[in-house]
Amino acid sequence: MNKVVQKRTASVVVALTGLWVAFSPLMLDMSNTAMWNAIIAGGLLALMGAAQLFLRSGIPSVIGMLVAVWFALAAFVFDQSTAAMWSLGAAAVVGFVASVWDEVAALDVSHQKVSHSL
């Protein structure tokens, strides 16, 4: 797979994972606090995935990794159903792995562009 396509694919996976979390309160039972956490943190992850589509910087990917770690913690912190806890835990794993993949792919694309310009 082309490195640019790989970077974009990873960015889309991160963004979709964020949307999955942001819209999960519509389908899963959770407290008001857990709902707002899912909407805000999921929206942030979706925004970081979308930003990484257009930026060569790795900052959105690093923020995405931190948000994914927060998902893992939040799965146990907030009052929510077992299904919501598992959904957030799965989103933590997918979001973290996709953010790392996005970061590595972004670095590869940056190095590829630098080597072509020399």
Image (tube, rainbow, N blue to C red):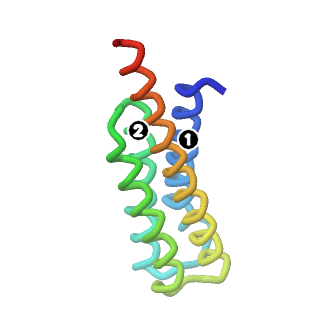
Number of marks present in the image shown: 2
User: What distance separates the C-alpha of mark 1 from that of mark 2?
Assistant: 9 Å
Counting from the top left corner in percent of width and height, residue 43 is at: 41, 54
Name the side, left or right, on which 36 lies relative to 83. left
Task: Note whether 86 is above or below 68 in the view shown.
Answer: below
Q: Amino acid at mark 1?
A: Ala
Left or right: residue 113 compared with residue 8: left
Task: For the C terminus, give its image quadrant.
Answer: top left
- Taking the image as shown, residue 52 lies to the left or right of residue 72, namely left
Residue lying at 45% horizontally and 49% vertically, measured from the top left: 46
Residue extending furthest top?
Answer: 117
User: x, y percentage for residue 17?
Assistant: 56, 53
Q: Which mark is residue 10?
A: 1
Check residue 52 in the rendering and tell me which mark sits there, or answer none: 2
Q: Identify the residue shown where x is 56% and y is 27%.
A: 3
Q: In terms of secondary structure, where does tag 2 sit? A: helix
- Up-down: is 112 above or below 96? above
Disc nearer the start of the sequence (1/2): 1
Q: Name the secondary structure under disc 1.
A: helix
Q: Which image quarter is the N terminus in?
A: top right
How far from the left and from the top, in percent, is residue 18? 50, 54
Q: Residue at x 53, y 61 (%)?
A: 21
Query: In terms of depth relative to the viewer, which is nearer, 8 or 40?
Result: 8
Q: Give the residue type at disc 2.
A: Gln
Q: Are discs 1 and 2 less than 8 Å apart at CB?
A: yes
